Amino acid sequence: MRLKNKVCIITGSSSGIGEAIARGFAAEGAKVIITYLTKKKEAENIATQINSELVLKLDIRKRLSIKETFRK
């Protein structure tokens, strides 16, 4: 539980490397915020599996999307 009481935003965590990182951080005790660009259902499934309370659409190419993610 090296990441207990830490909050992590993992970009692209609906699949691939981002998903693996999200799962690893959650296993270490972090609260993980799952983000996706197009794979909402996949992101929601992963969030359920790792007990993440927040799933957000994020386009890291757009400043407004980043600001909105951090605001939430």
Image (tube, rainbow, N blue to C red):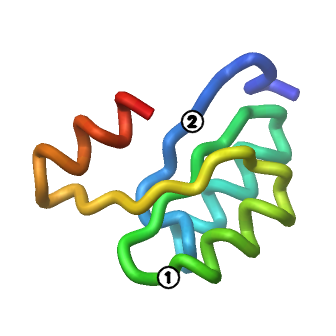
Residue 70 image position (x, y, % from top left):
36, 32
Residue shown at 73% from the left, 45% from the top? 53
Q: Is residue 38 above or below residue 55?
A: below
The Cα–Cα distance between marks 1 and 2, rounded to whole angstroms, is: 19 Å
Label 2 is placed on what type of residue? Cys
Label 2 crowd bin: few (<14), some (14–19), many (20+), radius 10 Å: some
Residue 34 image position (x, y, % from top left):
58, 55
- Is residue 34 left or right of 68 when viewed as pictured? right
Residue shown at 53% from the left, 70% from the top? 17
Residue 37 image position (x, y, % from top left):
36, 72
What residue would you read off at disc 2? 8
Looking at the image, is mark 1 or mark 2 earlier in the sequence?
2
What residue would you read off at disc 1? 39
Q: Quadrant of the N terminus?
A: top right
Q: Is residue 29 above or below residue 36?
A: above
* Residue closest to the eye, 10 or 41: 41
Residue 8 image position (x, y, % from top left):
57, 35
> In what element is the residue under mark 2?
strand
Query: Label for residue 5?
Result: none
